[in-house]
Amino acid sequence: MKLCVIAIVISVSVINSEEMKPLNILAIFPFPGKSHGIIFNNLLEALVRRGHNLTHVSYFPINKPLKYYRHIHLAEDTSAKVLEDDFVLESSYSTILEVNKLVVVAGNENCKMLLDNKHVQKLWMEKTKFDLVVYEYFSTDCPLAIAHRLGAPVVGLTGCTLMAWQFDTLGVPFNPSFVPQQFLDGDAKPTLFQRIERTLFHHYFNLYYKLIGIATDEQTVKSYFDDVPSLSELARNVKIILMNTYWMLFDFNLLPPNVIEIGGFHVSGNISLPNKLLQFIEESEHGVIYVSFGSIIKSSVSDSDKIEKIVGALSKLPQRIIWKWEDHKPPGNLDKIYVSKWLPQKDILAHPKVLAFLSHCGLVSTTEAVTFGVPIVGMPIFGDQPTNAAAIEEKGFGVRVQLSELTSEHLLEKFKTVLDPHFRAKVKSLSKSWQDRPMKPMETAIFWTEFAARHPNHTFRAPAADVPLYQYLNLDILLVFIVFAFTVFLGFKYLISVVFINVARNSNKAKKQ
């Protein structure tokens, strides 16, 4: 018995020592979206604190003194613009097309800026040894060319649901009858019109990305490397994709085994609020409603009519208001309002007196509210927000209001729904289920990141990613059935014609006799 115990202790020690072996990690995050940088840095910081050496290429450094951390700033000596407070409250087909174009073109620009950076070039020219490359799986796969040159396995990290062009790469089936299209409204039970809409936009986004995104990036990569496979091929060999979702909110995708859900991984750490803000919340007699439309939507310059409708609804509620507002002058004539250009959102949502959240339904905001059990009134604008808002309402975490339907009375009714004690109790219960997992999301993210480095010679992609289109659509099987049916038809036709000919001959013989 003692020998068994000793053997177990030694085995665990060996496993732990292997897991804790310091890795040399290269993290490449070339997209200049502030909300993206904020959540990704949580995982990168956790990896450094585990003793790994990290070289971080991005626009958003980790602003903490970390011993094994080095940052390469992509905005250095350039006019690169960080995406922050750039959009207004507007939702339409033209907005969808414009945002899709922005994402793809931004990916092309990010690719050029990344490969043109002299410090990044130095990494591959000096053949720096890296055990792993972590990159943002979003609008460009250019980091994969660098990873290939360095001979390192790759982990992708995405802060949103899958983009249209990522379904085929991962071998994920897209069926518009139950799988939402990220940029469009609709839940897992769409109408006929929504299914048509999803199909058209899905194929349009795919085609646009292949003709503009991938094609442009391929030309950029060729100007720096002459011995790198196509980006499409490299994308199929990414070891692990870590995605900021969880099946409790999104259960409509048939994800392959190498796509690991880590929804809410960034929601951790101590809760800390500025004294003035903390006092504002704690002195609220009826609680607080938090209002924010994310880091890239500028509320203060949005359509004044929409803002007035929001203010009209909020003014009829007894709760205090905290609003991410980019102007010094508060919106409307709201009493008891706290405004700031920047707010510690995660810490605000964690406070028990925060009763509801008026949100654009970005995935970062959504996962934070779900984690802390704060009911959401969703007002989606673009990107993955319509999909997130639909999932929020379908799963019972909140309700949604379309911009086209926005009135003060309609919004007020939505707030009354989520502020109802029974509704809030249900959301709290769902939140407990959301948090009840075998491993914490951050621990899951760290495990699979280190797993990819421990097993660099294995790729775990779904077989569907390698199946030719004609097989994926079962066209060959259909052809066999058609040929078989046609052959049977010809056979019956031949037999019938033979029978009729014999009958005719016998009839003629009988007449002659």
Image (tube, rainbow, N blue to C red):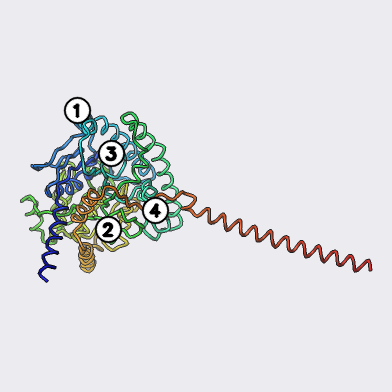
x, y percent for residue 10:
12, 60
Q: Amino acid at mark 1?
A: Asp
Q: Earlier in the sequence, mark 4 or mark 3?
A: 3
Label 2 vs label 3, nearer the camera: 3
Which quadrant is home to the N terminus? bottom left
Q: Residues within 10 Å of mark 4 (few under 14, many from 20)?
A: few
Q: CA distance from mark 4 to mark 3?
A: 24 Å
Q: Which mark is residue 77?
A: 1
Q: Are marks 2 and 1 in contact (CB under 8 Å)?
A: no
61 to 219, vertically: above or below: below
Which residue is painted at 36% across and 58% down in the image? 254
Q: Which mark is residue 463?
A: 4
Q: Are marks 2 and 4 in contact (CB under 8 Å)?
A: no
The quadrant in which residue 280 appears is bottom left
Secondary structure type for disc 3: helix
Q: Amino acid at mark 2?
A: Tyr
x, y percent for residue 465:
39, 50
Q: Residue furthest bottom?
A: 1
Secondary structure type for disc 2: loop
Which residue is painted at 39% across and 53% down in the image? 463
User: Looking at the image, which is closer to me, 451 or 393?
Assistant: 451
Q: Earlier in the sequence, mark 2 or mark 4?
A: 2
Q: Residue furthest front?
A: 3
- The residue that disc 3 covers is 143
Q: CA distance from mark 3 to mark 1?
A: 21 Å
